[in-house]
Amino acid sequence: QKEVEQNSGPLSVPEGAIASLNCTYSDRGSQSFFWYRQYSGKSPELIMFIYSNGDKEDGRFTAQLNKASQYVSLLIRDSQPSDSATYLCAVTSGGSYIPTFGRGTSLIVHP
Amino acid sequence: DAEITQSPRHKITETGRQVTLACHQTWNHNNMFWYRQDLGHGLRLIHYSYGVHDTNKGEVSDGYSVSRSNTEDLPLTLESAASSQTSVYFCASSEGLGDSYEQYFGPGTRLTVT
């Protein structure tokens, strides 16, 4: 069974710091990796996706993928209180269009 | 702008009633999905469709059905609502072409079964 694991948190960081969110997955055939942000009472919002080993940067967000170690991480630089949310990791494999979602990590950015 | 909408946003119904939740997308995406999200369980897949007239069961499909008569809509029907189906329901879509796997979610429907 394909599994995607995330620490539920909460991860608490001060404003302006780097928040580091981690996700591990069990299926070595995994090909596509996604990070969603979900504010309380709202729907998941896609913020990053990464397909290749290495780093991918988009503004204050950086996704890092290491297929050999089977983990993907999301770094948020200059964290803001508005970044406080639950971050969901999702993984697809074998050409499937159905992702496996982790249960999410709660991030709290305090002023 | 293209979008995905759900209606109603909130619904209260009684046990045993049939309920239909609507999902409409203007992305022209081939793939559409229904999830439920509950505390302690995360997102769970109910049903999905890869195109018109195609439907497939997800991991928690019992008590639910879908039909896909056009590209834009995938309504979710609860045949006989049960209290265990009280949840937040999200519809999502993805392009379904080549290497494009990312999903986009609707705003959700909060369903309460009393």
Image (cartoon, coloured by chain):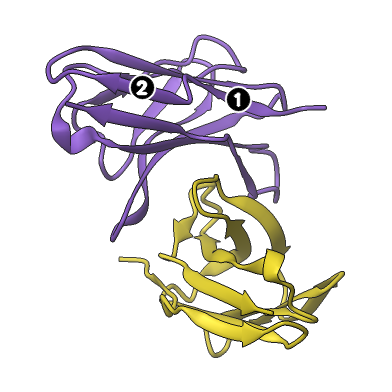
Chain colours: A yellow, B purple
Quarter-of-image position of residue A63: bottom right
Q: Could you tell me which chain the residue with mark 1 belongs to?
A: B
In the rendered structure, the residue with mark 2 lies on which chain? B
Mark on residue B11? 2
Asked if marks 2 and 1 fall on the same chain, the answer is yes
Inter-mark Cα distance, 2 to 1: 15 Å
Q: In this view, does B71 lie above or below A59?
A: above
Question: Which sits earlier in the primary sequence, circle 2 or circle 1?
Answer: 1
Quadrant in which the C terminus of chain A appears:
bottom right
Query: Disc 2 on helix, strand or loop?
Result: strand
Q: Which amino acid does label 2 sit on?
A: Lys
Residue A50: tell me if it is visible: no
In the image as oriented, which residue stretches furthest toward the right?
A: A59
Which residue is painted at 55% across and 74% down in the image? Answer: A107
- Is label 1 in a helix, a strand or a loop? strand
User: How many discs mark residues in the rendered view?
Assistant: 2
Find residue B59 and report its horizontal and vertical position in percent. 28, 45
Q: Which residue type does callout 1 highlight? A: Thr
Q: Could you tell whether A61 is left or right of A7 in the image?
A: right
Looking at the image, residue B76 sits to the left or right of residue A54; the answer is: left
Image-quadrant location for residue A12: bottom right
- Where residue A35 appears, as percent x and y from the top left, is 62, 64
Residue B48 vs residue A55: left or right? left
Residue at far front of view = A111
The answer to whether one can see residue B74 in this image is: yes
- Mark 1, Cα crowd under 10 Å, few <14 / some 14-19 / many 20+, is many
Quadrant in which the N terminus of chain A appears: bottom left
Q: Mark 1 points at which residue?
A: B5
